Structure formats: C-alpha cells, structure tokens
Image (tube, rainbow, N blue to C red):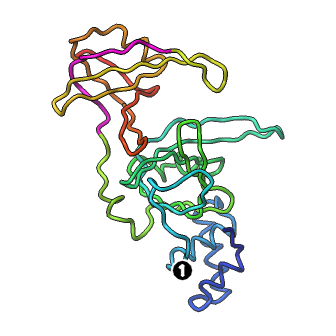
Amino acid sequence: MHRNKDQLYEEIKDLLSKHEFEEEISKIKKENDDLFDDETAALFIVDTLGRNKENICNISDIEHGMECSVYGKIIDIQKERKFNRKNGSQGRVINLELTDGTGKCRLALWDKDVDLVEKGKIKNGTNVKIINGYVKEGFNGIEINVGRYGLLEIEPENVPEKVEGYIPDPSEISGKIIKKEPSKAFFKDDGEFGFVTYVEIQTNNGIKKITLWDKKVKEIQNFKIGELVNIKNINFKEKNGKKEIHTKSKTTIERV
C-alpha cells in the first residue's frame, strides 16, 4: 500500500523531529544522485529505523499481482535494453536474476535505476532488499519491479542467513552426451519462430537434463552421442518446485 511522506513520518515521529526528517531526506537524495524522490527517501529512513511494517516474502511464495518486500542476492545481470515509449521518450530497462535461497525471480530495473548497475553499485553477488515491489508474470516467469512506490536498498542490514550464505549454482556443466531429443519449432510472442531441444549429460554428479533454445539448438547438432562437452554460462530456473537447466544467449558449448 502506498504511503506518502507525511504518513511515513508518522511511523518515526518519536525518533526524529520533522526538521531532522527533512534533512535526512535531502541527505539521502544527494548521496544517491537524486535517483530517489522525497517519498522513496522517506521510506528508506523508516526502513532503516526498523519501523517499516511491510511483510517480507520468500521469493518462492510471490505471485502475479502481489505487492511485497523481499531480500535477495543478485546472481546474473543481463544487457541494458533501450526502447521508445508512446509519448516519444526513450526508456531503459535492465533485467537481473535474484535469489533468496528459496527460489529465483527476475528483478527489472527501469530508467534511472539502471544507473545503479552502470556505476557498479549493483553487481553479481550484491545483496538487495526490495520494499513494496510489485510482482507480475513476465516473458520468462515471475518478475518483481521496484515501481513508483517501491524502494530498492543495496546491501541492507539484517540480511537473512539464507540470502547471505547462498551458494550459487555452477555456471557450467561437463560430461558425456548420452541422449539428444529431436528439435521442436514454436511461435514466439513476437510472431517469430523459436526452436527448442533437450540433451542429457552424464556428469560426475549424475545425469543432467539441459534445455537448449534457438541458436544453441543448431550448435548442439554438431555434437554426437558419446562426445565429451563443456557447457558454460548456463541458467538455472525454478519450476513447480524443481530446478531446471537452460541455455541462454551467452551459453557456449565446447568439446573437452
């Protein structure tokens, strides 16, 4: 639920005078290159003082349409994408992968928040807290957005152990190809053709099934059953409580 600056001050008026509150807002905005507006800075103050009443959700529990607050660790950052809005202005978005140890989701940063990545304030391994974010179903599963009435905290205090101690999935898999499924074609949302196939790799830790998409479908055709391969820059996804392995545009497939 959105709260304006005056409503937020009510949560901490026994801790700060109104003058101190306004000074802190100005200080936070300056420290963050005016990326925060007054209400976002006010929410940051309330949260820092431990008076934020928003419930913390596990990523595994978030669903389309929710407004929630989550802790998480950044484990993947994609390239910035620019687009034109209907009013003629240019927008920017960058997608990150976020985990809290219970699941993963996409975190979308828009416009000025993209600067946090470009300036190195957010990188792989950074812990974050999204307060009052809104959740929607994106093209690649559930994603959380900071939005107009939300707040993104970088390296917040009181990070849960499940986030702080999270060990990321391996970025590569090595082993012997033991099975290749026939390729399948499908229509993407933009009307273009897409391709998908599946392979099974015998590794030292058992058999791993990998889903390959588009260009990687063509690349795997150059490999035969029984060949040893090293597949780098893979992506792990959670679906129905199970972990899946997928390729992405940065994935490479090499003979060992």
Q: Is residue 255 magenta?
A: no
Q: Would you identify the image quadrant in which residue 228 lies?
A: top left
Q: Main secondary structure of the magenta part?
A: strand
Label 1 element class: loop
Residue reaching furthest to the bottom: 14
Query: Between residues 61 and 253, which one lies in front from this camera angle?
Result: 61
**Residue 186, percent from left and from top:** 56, 18
Residue reaching furthest to the left: 204
**Residue 178, percent from left and from top:** 24, 17
Q: Is residue 232 left or right of residue 21?
A: left
Q: Is residue 51 left or right of residue 73?
A: right
Q: Against 177, is 121 above or below?
A: below
Q: Would you identify the image quadrant in which residue 7 lies?
A: bottom right
**Residue 106, percent from left and from top:** 51, 45
- The magenta-colored residue range is 170-184
Q: Is residue 93 left or right of residue 214?
A: right
Q: Is residue 180 magenta?
A: yes
Query: Between residues 155 and 149, which one lies in front from this camera angle?
Result: 149
Q: Against 243, is 67 above or below?
A: below
- Residue placed at 15% from the left, 30% from the top? 204
Q: Which amino acid type corresponds to the residue marked 1 in the rendered image?
A: Arg
- Residue placed at 66% from the left, 61% from the top? 34
Residue at numbered disc 1: 51
- Residue placed at 48% from the left, 53% from the top? 121
Q: Is residue 234 left or right of residue 228?
A: right
Mark 1 is surrounded, within 10 Å at the Cα level, by few (under 14), some (14 to 19) or many (20 or more) other residues, namely few
